[in-house]
Image: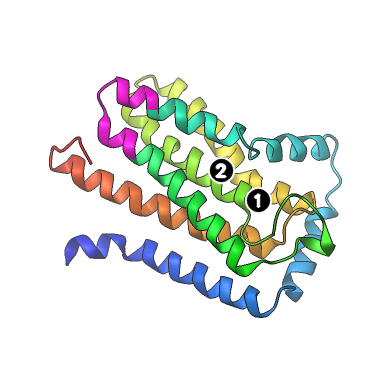
Amino acid sequence: MAKLRNYLPYLILLGMFGLLAWLVYLNPVLGVDTTVSGFIQGISLPGFNGFMGFISRLGNFPAWVISPVAAVIWLWCKGYRLQSVICGLVPAVTALIVGISKWIIDRPRPYGLEDGGTSFPSGHTAYALACYGVIFFLIPRFIRDPLLRLVLRLVCLVPILFMGISRVYLNAHWPSDVLASYLLAGAVLGIGLTYLWQRLAKGVNHA
């Protein structure tokens, strides 16, 4: 029972994702979406447009798979088998749920924008949190130098924090698409890491 409680916050996130998906399914265009989108798209700062474009491209295939694949291979070769499996499973499970959700919800992109798929949830945002998030939490266990550890974690945080904003700014997604992605990827990431920490606490290094 105690172990199940450790997963409860992430199961709540999944439930919130499900509720938001149902709401969007019933109402493809939400009033709050247009308000928040207008605010974000109204940001006018030097270089901001280029920065948003760069961040968004980090979520394109194959860019978003490079970091987790490299981490999976490195961890496996170093003998950290369980960490390697979790590092691969978190993005894979997230991508699977994103794909199924897009097919079921079938929400049009903002104002009919054609960008190679449907809108809900934001794949770019979910992949950013799933891929860079799992690496962010694993870095302290393998990088001893404090400065290098800080720099690498900051590098991971940039796409995590700005990917969602970039997708709304570029009019590729509604804010609710982005919120759903953070809920979903946060839940999958939390479940994966909780399982990992529990197994490692028992001295187990295999799935």
Residue extending farthest to the front is: 103
- Queried whether the magenta region covers residue 33, the answer comes back as no
Q: Secondary structure at mark 1?
A: helix
Location of residue 70 in the rendering, given as x and y in whole percent from the top left corner: 45, 25
- The image quadrant where one finds the N terminus is bottom left
Q: Is residue 29 left or right of residue 134?
A: right
Q: Secondary structure at mark 2?
A: helix
Q: Residue drawn 82% across and 40% down?
A: 49
Q: How many marks?
A: 2
Q: Residue drawn 69% across and 37% down?
A: 55
| Label 1 close to label 2 by CB (< 8 Å) | yes
Q: Is residue 118 in sight in this rendering?
A: yes
Query: Magenta-highlighted stretch: main secondary structure?
Result: helix
Q: Which residue is mark 1?
A: 164
**Region rendered in magenta:** 73-85
Location of residue 80 in the rendering, given as x and y in whole percent from the top left corner: 26, 28
Callout 1: 10 Å neighbours few (<14), some, many (20+)?
A: many
- Queried whether the magenta region covers residue 79, the answer comes back as yes
Q: Which residue is mark 2?
A: 128
